[in-house]
Amino acid sequence: MKKIPCLINNFNQLEYLIPMVDKLSSFDNLSLYILDNNSTYEPLLKWYHSLANTKIQVIKLGRNSGHMAPWSTHLTHRLAREYRSPYYIVSDPDLDISLIPDDTIDLMIDVLTQREIFKVGLSIEIEDLPEHYPLKNG
């Protein structure tokens, strides 16, 4: 099975990052990379250290390159070439993906190969927004 590089772009986020990494680690076809934007949050840095002997790689940028870091550092293309994959995944760390089905990656690849598009992604659940939220219906 060909691996797909998966980059999680992170800055000082730990609470949601851990469950995301746990879920993504369950996918056999992914290689996980955490792209760190010069985080200073000590519990996060300690957690990074705990990943030293795992398959999860932490890439420390030494500066905060922001939301465009996966592209401005050219890591997306470098990893896609390294893995000889036409695909790569980029995510922010603050998403709850605990309920995504096990075949999510396969389904996204199917959509990419069956249509003439270059990007797919997961949608955000908005059905459970509270009634008092001003933008619920608009």
Image (tube, rainbow, N blue to C red):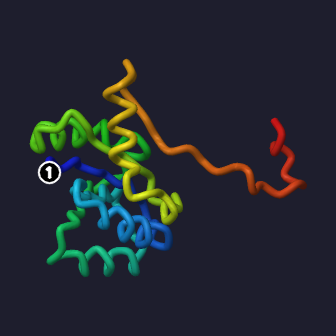
Q: Is residue 51 left or right of residue 11?
A: left
Quarter-wise, where is residue 80 in the image?
A: top left
The residue under label 1 is 1
Q: What residue lies at 40% left-to-right and 80% top-to-bottom?
A: 43
**Residue 38, image x, y percentages:** 34, 60
Question: 37 or 115: which is nearer to us?
Answer: 115
Q: Is residue 44 left or right of residue 87?
A: right
Judged from this view, the residue extending furthest toward the top is 116
Quarter-wise, where is residue 59 in the image?
A: bottom left
Q: What residue lies at 33% left-to-right and 75% top-to-bottom?
A: 45
> Would you place residue 114 above or below residue 102 in this image?
above
**Residue 94, image x, y percentages:** 51, 60
**Residue 33, image x, y percentages:** 25, 57
Q: Is residue 122 left or right of residue 137?
A: left
**Residue 6, image x, y percentages:** 29, 51
Amino acid type, callout 1? Met
Question: 66 or 116: which is nearer to us?
Answer: 116
Q: Is residue 61 left or right of residue 123?
A: left
Q: What residue lies at 30% left-to-right and 37% top-to-bottom?
A: 72
Q: In which quarter of the image is the C terminus?
A: top right
| Dot 1 alpha-carbon crowd within 10 angstroms: few under 14, some 14 to 19, many 20 or more | few
